[in-house]
Amino acid sequence: MGQSADSGSALSFRLSKEQEALREVAQRFTRKEIKPVALKFEEENGDALAHQVIDRAAQAGLLGLPVPLEFGGGGGSNVECTLVLEEIAAGCGGIATAIGASWFGQTPIMMAANSQQRREIFPPLAARDHGLLCCMAMTEPAGGTDIENPHMKSRTIRTVVREDGDNYVVNGRKLWPSNSDNAWLYTVVATADPARGDEGSCLVMVPAGTPGLSFGHPIPKMGMVADRNAEIVFEDVRVPKSNLLGKIGDGARLLQRTLVYNRAGAAAIAVGVARGAFEGALQWARERITMGQPLAKHPVVAAMLGDMATGIEASRLLYQRSAWFNAQPGQASMLMATMAKVFASDMAMRVTTDAVQIMGAYGYAREYGVEKAMRDAKILQIYIGANEFSRQLVGELL
Ligand SMILES: Cc1cc2nc3c(=O)[nH]c(=O)nc-3n(C[C@H](O)[C@H](O)[C@H](O)COP(=O)(O)OP(=O)(O)OC[C@H]3O[C@@H](n4cnc5c(N)ncnc54)[C@H](O)[C@@H]3O)c2cc1C
């Protein structure tokens, strides 16, 4: 899908017609299905409502976007997927996180699945009758940053797969993954031997409902409430050997490659969350009168709005450039994706905080949704590579 960005003039910032059309579908979906209920995700039964929205995203063809066309999906590259994540996040960061995390779990499958695995897994993930989610089960109770850190060479992974005849037996615990207890398929970051680092690392797929797979209660959180995070327990979970992605020893490399695509996704979610809050604050500032004129006419507020808009634009350029690299064969860039994620998430925290400030007490009130964006934004600086570690990584990759 989509024409490559370097056709025509040497430097083009235009989306293709197909990409524009896709963005409109996502915008319409967000306007109709997400914005009217975004605050309700945080109320009682909000989880059921969130899943209804995921079902509708499947019906609209958005959930299956990255699944290859031959399996009924949208065939979207990282460029199309990030465009859609921005639009959805402008309505609700939690729904965008649940969808982005499902794609996170699918990325290594896309990279390493053999043809039989692809035939089995992709059609259900592209199905439009209801939304099936994937879960990237990576983070463990002992810490997420170390697992994402290429220097740690997978040494901290404690989820173990043991060979037993034609099966692998999985034992271990994960904590925090998105779509933790409502996924259809779990892509599990594991090791065949914790002492072997990268060489023991592996990714294994565990279908929901496999005996021995259980979950803690969803963890109440500050934000991103439409996304479900809990402990996932693997207790003698037995899967056929054919559920391994690639071979033992591929896990760390696949995980690092996966992070590249999904850090661009996190940056797009950050832009969407920031934009949602910014649009609310801008409208407010144009209508609210203080000292006889609209807030937006006060020079300090105008400058704040200007900085917010600039931050959003700059972050969008970064994530789109990163996604563009990721969509070119052999050019996926950890450097670009990590830059985009750090810059955009810091921007989102700043912009959502300023949006609350501009709206005063109304910004602080639940009703207007801007304080939700501020709460949603915080985790963007932490998940899929805490920004302190990610900054260091950018410096090292230069
Ligand atoms: C809403 C949400 C969605 C999530 N989705 C997923 C998912 O889909 N899949 C999944 O597997 N996990 C997921 N996570 C977990 C998330 O990726 C981890 O929380 C994150 O990787 C950080 O790990 P940690 O919380 O264990 O913090 P730690 O690794 O303990 O780090 C804590 C803090 O210490 C600092 N720090 C740590 N290491 C370094 C370093 N090397 N240099 C400098 N500073 C450092 C950082 O400030 C960091 O924030 C999710 C979490 C949430 C809340």
Image: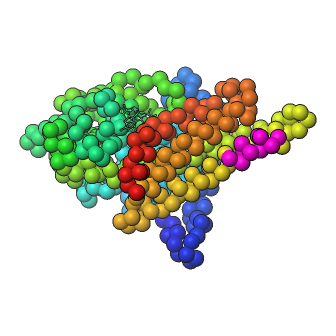
- Place of residue 368 in the rendered image (x, y in percent of width and height, measured from the top left): 69, 31
- Place of residue 177 in the rendered image (x, y in percent of width and height, measured from the top left): 38, 35
Seen as rendered, the residue at the extreme bottom is: 8
Q: Which residues are magenta?
A: 298-307
Residue shown at the point (74%, 45%) measured from the top left: 303
Residue shown at the point (49%, 38%) measured from the top left: 381
Seen as rendered, the residue at the extreme right is: 292
- Type of secondary structure dominating the magenta stretch: helix
Point out the image quarter for the C terminus.
bottom left
Residue nearest the viewer, comparing 351 with 56: 351
Residue shown at the point (31%, 56%) measured from the top left: 111
Q: Residue 272 lies in magenta, yes or no? A: no
- Place of residue 150 in the rendered image (x, y in percent of width and height, measured from the top left): 30, 47
User: Residue 95, relative to residue 394: is it above or below?
Assistant: above
Assign ligand 1 to one image quadrant: top left
For residue 286, which quarter of the picture?
top right
In the rendered image, is residue 141 in sight? yes
Residue shown at the point (26%, 48%) measured from the top left: 252
In the picture provided, is 160 more to the left or to the right than 287? left
Q: Residue 304 lies in magenta, yes or no? A: yes
In the rendered image, is residue 63 in sight? no
